[in-house]
């Protein structure tokens, strides 16, 4: 892979994360819906590294760890860049383009990860079924990932 391609992947991942982060701020301002808690993600990641166990069902009530918020933001953007790598592979194989429609499709498909991985490993169950409002949790994840996918396509459009 060339340096230009790697930079394009990094840019697309950052743009996608920024789009999602801005969307979450708009939701906070317009509806009071709090954004993702990257501190808990950082705490989860620290605990995974420390214990080698993905499943951390009591992570939200566990003791805070110094630097968890910053580490959570790093994890968030690293995951976004990881998604961009997957998107780039799909583009290379001719399965996706840097179009908004393809970005939306990618975003919709990418919501599988929080629904079936991140929510369960954080003790919230598959598709958030252990939360007070599973449908809301799933719809927020879907909306976030749709915006993320659109941002991804836009990021590739400007970086390629």
Image (cartoon, helix red, strand yellow):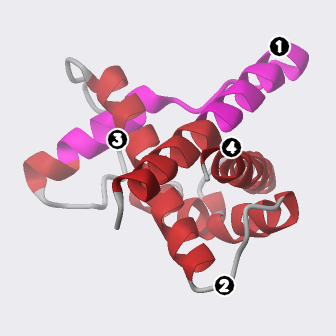
- Measure the C-alpha gap from mark 2 to mark 4: 19 Å
Residues drawn in magenta: 18-47
Q: Is residue 123 above or below residue 60?
A: below
Q: Which quadrant of the figure has residue 69?
A: top left
**Residue corresponding to mark 1:** 29
The residues bearing labels 2 and 3 have C-alpha atoms spaced at a distance of: 40 Å
Q: To which residue does mark 3 refer?
A: 59
Instruction: Give the Cα distance between marks 1 and 4.
Output: 28 Å
x%, y% of residue 27?
Answer: 82, 25
> Where residue 112 appears, x then y in whole percent?
62, 70
Sequence order check: which comes first, mark 2 or mark 3?
Answer: 3
Disc number at residue 142?
none
Name the residue: 62% across, 74% down.
91
Badge 2 density bin: few <14, some 14–19, many ≥20, Cα 10 Å: few
The residue that disc 2 covers is 94
Q: Name the N-terminal-most of marks 2 and 4.
A: 2
Secondary structure mostly taken by the magenta-highlighted segment of the chain: helix
């Amino acid at each position: 892979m060339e340096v230009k391609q790697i930079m394009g992947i990094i840019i697309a991942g950052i743009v996608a994360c920024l789009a999602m982060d801005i969307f979450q701020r708009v939701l906070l301002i317009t509806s009071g819906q709090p954004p993702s808690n990257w501190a808990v993600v950082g705490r989860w990641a620290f605990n995974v590294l420390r214990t080698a166990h993905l499943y951390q069902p009591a992570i939200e009530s566990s003791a805070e760890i110094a630097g968890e918020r910053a580490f959570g933001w790093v994890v968030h953007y690293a995951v976004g860049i990881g998604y961009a790598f997957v998107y780039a592979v799909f583009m290379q194989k001719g399965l996706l383009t840097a179009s908004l429609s393809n970005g939306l499709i990618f975003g919709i498909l990418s919501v599988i990860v929080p629904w079936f991985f991140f929510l369960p490993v954080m003790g919230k169950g598959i598709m958030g079924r252990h939360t007070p409002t599973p449908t809301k949790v799933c719809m927020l994840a879907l909306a976030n990932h749709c915006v993320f996918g659109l941002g991804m396509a836009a990021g590739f459009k400007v970086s390629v």
